[in-house]
Amino acid sequence: MTTAELTGAALGERVPVGGRFGWLMTIYRYALVILLAAVFVFPFVVMLTTAFKVSDEIFMAPPELLPRTWTLEHFANALTQIPFFRFLTNTIVIAGLSVLGTVLVSPLVAYSLAKLRWRGRNLLFIMVLATMMLPPQVTLIPIYMMWNNVGATGTILPLIVPAFLGTPFFIFLIRQFLLSVPDELIEAAKVDGASEFRIYWSIVLPIARPALITSAVFQFVWAWTDFLYPLIYLNDEESYTLSIGLYSFLGQHGVQWGPLMAACVLFTLPAFLIFLVFQRYFIGGIATGALK
Protein backbone atom coordinates (compact mmCIF):
# COMPACT_ATOMS: atom_id res chain seq x y z
CA MET A 1 0.00 0.00 0.00
CA THR A 2 1.20 3.49 -0.78
CA THR A 3 1.36 6.30 1.79
CA ALA A 4 -1.78 7.86 0.33
CA GLU A 5 -3.69 4.58 0.61
CA LEU A 6 -2.57 4.08 4.22
CA THR A 7 -3.63 7.63 5.07
CA GLY A 8 -7.01 7.09 3.44
CA ALA A 9 -7.51 3.85 5.35
CA ALA A 10 -6.64 5.59 8.61
CA LEU A 11 -9.24 8.28 7.87
CA GLY A 12 -11.89 5.63 7.18
CA GLU A 13 -11.86 5.96 3.41
CA ARG A 14 -12.52 2.91 1.26
CA VAL A 15 -9.34 1.45 -0.22
CA PRO A 16 -9.74 -0.35 -3.58
CA VAL A 17 -9.17 -4.09 -3.32
CA GLY A 18 -5.98 -5.12 -5.09
CA GLY A 19 -4.42 -1.68 -4.98
CA ARG A 20 -3.26 -0.27 -8.27
CA PHE A 21 -3.78 -3.64 -10.04
CA GLY A 22 -7.41 -3.95 -9.00
CA TRP A 23 -8.56 -3.15 -12.52
CA LEU A 24 -6.75 -6.26 -13.77
CA MET A 25 -8.79 -8.44 -11.41
CA THR A 26 -11.96 -6.72 -12.61
CA ILE A 27 -11.09 -7.45 -16.24
CA TYR A 28 -10.26 -11.06 -15.33
CA ARG A 29 -13.61 -11.57 -13.57
CA TYR A 30 -15.62 -10.13 -16.45
CA ALA A 31 -13.65 -12.15 -19.00
CA LEU A 32 -14.26 -15.35 -17.03
CA VAL A 33 -17.99 -14.65 -16.76
CA ILE A 34 -18.23 -13.88 -20.49
CA LEU A 35 -16.31 -17.06 -21.34
CA LEU A 36 -18.54 -19.26 -19.19
CA ALA A 37 -21.66 -17.59 -20.60
CA ALA A 38 -20.43 -18.21 -24.13
CA VAL A 39 -19.85 -21.91 -23.36
CA PHE A 40 -23.43 -22.35 -22.14
CA VAL A 41 -25.06 -20.16 -24.81
CA PHE A 42 -23.20 -21.63 -27.80
CA PRO A 43 -25.27 -24.87 -28.09
CA PHE A 44 -28.48 -22.83 -28.03
CA VAL A 45 -27.13 -20.50 -30.73
CA VAL A 46 -26.19 -23.51 -32.90
CA MET A 47 -29.68 -24.97 -32.44
CA LEU A 48 -31.30 -21.65 -33.32
CA THR A 49 -29.24 -20.97 -36.43
CA THR A 50 -29.53 -24.57 -37.65
CA ALA A 51 -33.31 -24.27 -37.54
CA PHE A 52 -33.13 -21.42 -40.07
CA LYS A 53 -30.60 -23.03 -42.45
CA VAL A 54 -31.52 -24.81 -45.63
CA SER A 55 -30.70 -28.52 -45.58
CA ASP A 56 -27.61 -28.18 -47.78
CA GLU A 57 -25.98 -25.72 -45.38
CA ILE A 58 -26.40 -27.72 -42.16
CA PHE A 59 -23.36 -29.96 -42.78
CA MET A 60 -21.39 -27.52 -44.89
CA ALA A 61 -17.59 -27.88 -44.65
CA PRO A 62 -16.15 -25.80 -43.17
CA PRO A 63 -19.19 -25.18 -40.96
CA GLU A 64 -20.68 -21.71 -40.69
CA LEU A 65 -22.57 -20.45 -37.68
CA LEU A 66 -24.98 -18.13 -39.48
CA PRO A 67 -27.06 -19.35 -42.42
CA ARG A 68 -26.39 -17.93 -45.86
CA THR A 69 -30.02 -18.40 -46.80
CA TRP A 70 -32.65 -18.00 -44.10
CA THR A 71 -35.67 -20.28 -44.35
CA LEU A 72 -38.77 -21.21 -42.32
CA GLU A 73 -39.19 -24.53 -44.11
CA HIS A 74 -38.01 -26.59 -41.15
CA PHE A 75 -40.55 -24.97 -38.82
CA ALA A 76 -43.33 -25.83 -41.27
CA ASN A 77 -42.10 -29.43 -41.45
CA ALA A 78 -41.89 -29.67 -37.66
CA LEU A 79 -45.49 -28.47 -37.32
CA THR A 80 -46.85 -30.84 -39.95
CA GLN A 81 -44.82 -34.04 -39.54
CA ILE A 82 -45.87 -34.44 -35.91
CA PRO A 83 -49.12 -33.39 -34.17
CA PHE A 84 -47.24 -30.50 -32.61
CA PHE A 85 -50.23 -28.51 -31.37
CA ARG A 86 -51.79 -31.54 -29.69
CA PHE A 87 -48.52 -32.24 -27.89
CA LEU A 88 -48.29 -28.54 -27.05
CA THR A 89 -51.79 -28.54 -25.55
CA ASN A 90 -51.02 -31.61 -23.45
CA THR A 91 -47.81 -30.02 -22.16
CA ILE A 92 -49.57 -26.73 -21.33
CA VAL A 93 -52.31 -28.58 -19.42
CA ILE A 94 -49.83 -30.66 -17.40
CA ALA A 95 -47.50 -27.73 -16.68
CA GLY A 96 -50.37 -25.37 -15.86
CA LEU A 97 -52.07 -27.77 -13.44
CA SER A 98 -48.72 -28.57 -11.81
CA VAL A 99 -48.06 -24.87 -11.24
CA LEU A 100 -51.59 -24.41 -9.88
CA GLY A 101 -51.14 -27.26 -7.42
CA THR A 102 -47.77 -25.90 -6.32
CA VAL A 103 -48.95 -22.36 -5.58
CA LEU A 104 -52.09 -23.61 -3.81
CA VAL A 105 -50.71 -26.32 -1.53
CA SER A 106 -47.00 -25.71 -0.89
CA PRO A 107 -47.52 -22.21 0.63
CA LEU A 108 -50.15 -23.61 3.02
CA VAL A 109 -47.77 -26.26 4.33
CA ALA A 110 -44.89 -23.77 4.45
CA TYR A 111 -46.97 -21.27 6.43
CA SER A 112 -47.95 -23.89 8.99
CA LEU A 113 -44.30 -24.89 9.41
CA ALA A 114 -43.05 -21.31 9.65
CA LYS A 115 -45.67 -19.41 11.66
CA LEU A 116 -48.07 -21.79 13.39
CA ARG A 117 -47.20 -23.42 16.72
CA TRP A 118 -48.25 -27.05 16.98
CA ARG A 119 -46.81 -30.25 18.38
CA GLY A 120 -44.60 -32.20 15.99
CA ARG A 121 -43.97 -29.27 13.68
CA ASN A 122 -40.18 -29.57 13.76
CA LEU A 123 -40.34 -33.35 13.32
CA LEU A 124 -42.52 -32.98 10.24
CA PHE A 125 -40.15 -30.39 8.82
CA ILE A 126 -37.24 -32.79 9.29
CA MET A 127 -39.23 -35.46 7.44
CA VAL A 128 -39.87 -33.02 4.59
CA LEU A 129 -36.14 -32.33 4.37
CA ALA A 130 -35.40 -36.07 4.50
CA THR A 131 -37.58 -36.72 1.46
CA MET A 132 -35.48 -34.21 -0.50
CA MET A 133 -32.42 -36.37 0.08
CA LEU A 134 -33.91 -39.42 -1.65
CA PRO A 135 -33.03 -39.70 -5.36
CA PRO A 136 -36.19 -40.05 -7.46
CA GLN A 137 -34.87 -43.32 -8.91
CA VAL A 138 -35.19 -44.91 -5.45
CA THR A 139 -38.94 -44.35 -5.27
CA LEU A 140 -39.67 -44.69 -8.99
CA ILE A 141 -40.78 -48.35 -8.99
CA PRO A 142 -42.88 -48.24 -5.76
CA ILE A 143 -44.66 -45.08 -6.91
CA TYR A 144 -45.32 -46.57 -10.34
CA MET A 145 -46.79 -49.70 -8.71
CA MET A 146 -49.01 -47.50 -6.55
CA TRP A 147 -50.38 -45.58 -9.56
CA ASN A 148 -50.77 -48.83 -11.50
CA ASN A 149 -52.77 -50.41 -8.69
CA VAL A 150 -55.26 -47.54 -8.73
CA GLY A 151 -55.49 -47.62 -12.53
CA ALA A 152 -53.95 -44.20 -13.11
CA THR A 153 -51.12 -45.24 -15.44
CA GLY A 154 -51.73 -44.11 -19.00
CA THR A 155 -53.30 -40.86 -17.72
CA ILE A 156 -51.88 -37.48 -16.72
CA LEU A 157 -52.88 -37.94 -13.07
CA PRO A 158 -49.43 -39.19 -11.91
CA LEU A 159 -47.91 -36.06 -13.47
CA ILE A 160 -50.16 -33.48 -11.80
CA VAL A 161 -51.50 -34.97 -8.54
CA PRO A 162 -48.12 -34.86 -6.71
CA ALA A 163 -48.06 -31.06 -7.10
CA PHE A 164 -51.41 -30.88 -5.24
CA LEU A 165 -49.94 -32.91 -2.37
CA GLY A 166 -47.05 -30.53 -1.73
CA THR A 167 -43.52 -30.57 -3.12
CA PRO A 168 -40.77 -30.74 -0.44
CA PHE A 169 -38.39 -28.39 -2.23
CA PHE A 170 -41.01 -25.66 -2.64
CA ILE A 171 -42.25 -26.14 0.92
CA PHE A 172 -38.70 -25.61 2.15
CA LEU A 173 -38.11 -22.61 -0.12
CA ILE A 174 -41.33 -20.81 0.84
CA ARG A 175 -40.91 -21.63 4.53
CA GLN A 176 -37.47 -20.06 4.57
CA PHE A 177 -38.94 -16.96 2.96
CA LEU A 178 -41.85 -16.78 5.41
CA LEU A 179 -39.45 -16.79 8.35
CA SER A 180 -38.59 -13.22 7.37
CA VAL A 181 -42.21 -12.10 7.91
CA PRO A 182 -42.35 -10.31 11.31
CA ASP A 183 -44.40 -12.14 13.92
CA GLU A 184 -45.54 -8.76 15.22
CA LEU A 185 -47.38 -8.16 11.94
CA ILE A 186 -49.35 -11.38 12.36
CA GLU A 187 -50.06 -10.69 16.04
CA ALA A 188 -51.35 -7.21 15.18
CA ALA A 189 -53.72 -8.72 12.62
CA LYS A 190 -55.01 -11.20 15.21
CA VAL A 191 -55.63 -8.36 17.66
CA ASP A 192 -57.70 -6.63 14.97
CA GLY A 193 -59.84 -9.77 14.72
CA ALA A 194 -58.45 -11.30 11.53
CA SER A 195 -58.84 -15.05 11.18
CA GLU A 196 -55.90 -17.33 10.46
CA PHE A 197 -56.95 -17.77 6.86
CA ARG A 198 -57.44 -14.01 6.42
CA ILE A 199 -53.93 -13.41 7.74
CA TYR A 200 -52.56 -16.02 5.39
CA TRP A 201 -54.46 -14.75 2.35
CA SER A 202 -54.26 -10.98 2.83
CA ILE A 203 -50.93 -10.51 4.60
CA VAL A 204 -48.61 -13.47 4.19
CA LEU A 205 -49.21 -14.37 0.55
CA PRO A 206 -48.66 -10.83 -0.83
CA ILE A 207 -45.39 -10.59 1.12
CA ALA A 208 -44.30 -14.03 -0.14
CA ARG A 209 -44.97 -13.20 -3.79
CA PRO A 210 -41.28 -13.48 -4.85
CA ALA A 211 -41.04 -16.97 -3.34
CA LEU A 212 -44.33 -17.99 -4.94
CA ILE A 213 -43.24 -16.79 -8.37
CA THR A 214 -39.90 -18.54 -7.94
CA SER A 215 -41.68 -21.81 -7.09
CA ALA A 216 -44.09 -21.38 -10.01
CA VAL A 217 -41.24 -20.78 -12.48
CA PHE A 218 -39.32 -23.78 -11.17
CA GLN A 219 -42.38 -26.03 -11.37
CA PHE A 220 -43.30 -24.83 -14.84
CA VAL A 221 -39.82 -25.47 -16.22
CA TRP A 222 -39.64 -28.90 -14.54
CA ALA A 223 -43.05 -29.95 -15.86
CA TRP A 224 -42.43 -28.47 -19.31
CA THR A 225 -39.09 -30.20 -19.84
CA ASP A 226 -39.81 -33.43 -17.97
CA PHE A 227 -39.06 -36.51 -20.05
CA LEU A 228 -38.75 -39.45 -17.64
CA TYR A 229 -42.17 -39.40 -15.97
CA PRO A 230 -44.22 -38.79 -19.15
CA LEU A 231 -42.25 -41.60 -20.78
CA ILE A 232 -43.19 -43.95 -17.93
CA TYR A 233 -46.83 -43.02 -17.37
CA LEU A 234 -48.13 -41.95 -20.81
CA ASN A 235 -48.84 -44.86 -23.13
CA ASP A 236 -51.18 -43.27 -25.66
CA GLU A 237 -49.83 -40.91 -28.32
CA GLU A 238 -52.90 -38.72 -27.86
CA SER A 239 -51.63 -37.74 -24.41
CA TYR A 240 -47.93 -37.29 -25.28
CA THR A 241 -46.12 -34.16 -24.15
CA LEU A 242 -43.71 -32.23 -26.35
CA SER A 243 -40.66 -33.92 -24.90
CA ILE A 244 -42.04 -37.38 -25.73
CA GLY A 245 -43.36 -36.10 -29.06
CA LEU A 246 -39.91 -34.89 -30.10
CA TYR A 247 -38.43 -38.26 -29.14
CA SER A 248 -41.03 -40.10 -31.22
CA PHE A 249 -40.37 -37.69 -34.11
CA LEU A 250 -36.69 -38.62 -33.96
CA GLY A 251 -37.53 -42.32 -34.01
CA GLN A 252 -40.07 -42.16 -36.86
CA HIS A 253 -38.30 -39.81 -39.27
CA GLY A 254 -34.64 -40.47 -38.51
CA VAL A 255 -32.22 -37.67 -37.86
CA GLN A 256 -33.70 -34.78 -39.85
CA TRP A 257 -31.66 -32.11 -38.17
CA GLY A 258 -33.41 -29.11 -39.65
CA PRO A 259 -36.98 -29.96 -38.54
CA LEU A 260 -35.64 -31.42 -35.29
CA MET A 261 -33.79 -28.21 -34.40
CA ALA A 262 -36.86 -26.15 -35.36
CA ALA A 263 -39.04 -28.28 -33.07
CA CYS A 264 -36.48 -27.90 -30.28
CA VAL A 265 -36.57 -24.12 -30.68
CA LEU A 266 -40.36 -24.13 -30.39
CA PHE A 267 -40.09 -26.43 -27.38
CA THR A 268 -37.51 -24.25 -25.61
CA LEU A 269 -39.06 -20.87 -26.35
CA PRO A 270 -41.92 -20.87 -23.76
CA ALA A 271 -39.64 -21.82 -20.86
CA PHE A 272 -37.14 -19.17 -21.95
CA LEU A 273 -39.82 -16.48 -22.13
CA ILE A 274 -41.24 -17.44 -18.74
CA PHE A 275 -37.81 -17.11 -17.14
CA LEU A 276 -37.14 -13.84 -18.96
CA VAL A 277 -40.39 -12.24 -17.80
CA PHE A 278 -40.13 -13.36 -14.17
CA GLN A 279 -36.35 -13.20 -13.82
CA ARG A 280 -36.45 -10.39 -11.26
CA TYR A 281 -38.79 -12.27 -8.93
CA PHE A 282 -36.97 -15.54 -9.58
CA ILE A 283 -33.55 -14.21 -8.53
CA GLY A 284 -35.02 -12.29 -5.61
CA GLY A 285 -36.79 -15.35 -4.24
CA ILE A 286 -33.69 -17.52 -4.54
CA ALA A 287 -31.49 -14.88 -2.89
CA THR A 288 -33.91 -14.38 0.01
CA GLY A 289 -34.26 -18.13 0.59
CA ALA A 290 -30.49 -18.53 0.57
CA LEU A 291 -29.99 -15.74 3.10
CA LYS A 292 -32.42 -17.35 5.51
Image: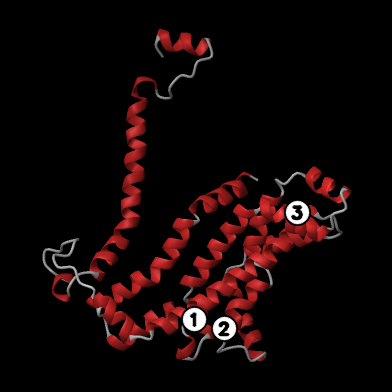
Identify the residue at image location x=20%, y=72%.
71
Circle 3 sits in a helix, a strand or a loop, which is it? helix
The amino acid type, in three-letter code, at marker 2 is Ile
Quarter holding the N terminus is top left
Mark toward the viewer: 2 or 1: 1
Q: Which residue matches tag 1?
A: 90
Q: Which residue matches tag 2?
A: 156
Q: Earlier in the sequence, mark 3 or mark 2?
A: 3
Q: Earlier in the sequence, mark 2 or mark 1?
A: 1
**How are the residues colored?**
secondary structure
Q: Which residue matches tag 3?
A: 114
Q: CA distance from mark 3 to mark 2?
A: 32 Å
The amino acid type, in three-letter code, at marker 1 is Asn
The answer to whether the residues at label 2 and label 1 have Cβ atoms under 8 Å apart is yes
Judge the density around disc 3: few (<14), some (14-19), many (≥20) Cα neighbours within 10 Å. many
Vertical comparison of 197 with 138: above or below: above
The amino acid type, in three-letter code, at marker 3 is Ala
Residue 259: x percent and y percent?
27, 77
Residue 42: x percent and y percent?
29, 58
Identify the residue at image location x=62%, y=58%.
212
